[in-house]
Amino acid sequence: MPLRPRFPSVRALTGAALLFAGMIAAPLTPARAADCPDAGALHAAGVTLTRNTPKMAQAYRYENGTLTSYRVDDPELGRPPKRERYDHPLAVSLQEMDGRSFALIYDDDPARLDQLPQLGNWRTPVSLKVDGETKDRGTISYAYRGTGSVQIGACRYDVWQVVERIAMGKLRTAFLKEFSPKAGLVLRVTKLDPETGKAQSQVAFDRIETRQK
């Protein structure tokens, strides 16, 4: 079904920015094992992931049945708040930031990614829409590379290691996404050189906790 981009209100983004500014300014304390959230928290108040250096906070929860995240970076970096929606925790479908929207429209249902360990690989044609206008077509693929674990504070999660590749026009990207079925989230992302597979950068977190209402 075509995705109709919906922009968050200025009030919503401003509120998110203020909330996360407080989160990333708070001193980092180790999480207790009993506080390690699972996927059920995403259907309630949500889950917050926080990075200490450089400061960044990203909160996730289901809104109207769709997994949604809000990200705020250290204000000194000058990056605007960003909202993302997901057709599957591994598959971003919409990014909204600085008054613009970028949507990925999957020809096939990303719900198939639930069976990725059995499938081994999954691929689908995809369209890129910018501010509602189709700009390009390509393919996106996911390859299951096995299992691992991610430690965030005192919380340890077993993860699937999945390589996502996008080929669209001249664009070629590759990311290693470490997805925890227990948490219902991708907990660590490593950008790879699309030709060599060598790691180039990584987004990892220092704290995970159930979001307070």
Image (spheres, rainbow, N blue to C red):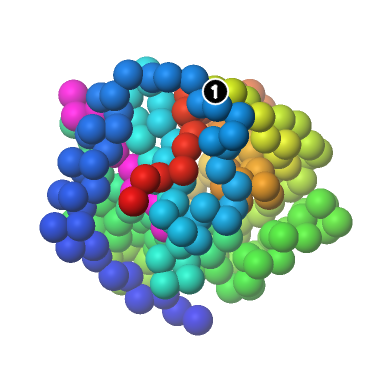
Residue 205 percent location from the top left of the image: 48, 28
Residue 175 percent location from the top left of the image: 58, 38
Compared across the picture, whether 164 is left or right of 53 comes to: right
- Along the viewing direction, whichever of 126 and 210 lies nearer the viewer: 210
Compared across the picture, whether 52 is left or right of 192 comes to: left
Residue at left 27%, top 38%? 20
**Up/down of 150 relative to 54, above or below:** below
**Up/down of 180 relative to 198, above or below:** below
Q: Which residue is mark 1?
A: 153
* Amino acid tagged 1: Gly
Residue at left 50%, top 55%? 42
- Along the viewing direction, whichever of 189 and 180 lies nearer the viewer: 180
Residue situated furthest right in the rendering: 118
Secondary-structure class at tag 1: loop
The residue stretch that appears in magenta: 68-76
Question: Can residue 54 be spotted in the picture?
Answer: no
From the image, give the main secondary structure of the stretch colored magenta.
strand
Dot 1 crowding, Cα within 10 Å, few <14, some 14–19, many 20+: some
Residue at left 81%, top 51%? 117
Residue 200 percent location from the top left of the image: 53, 23
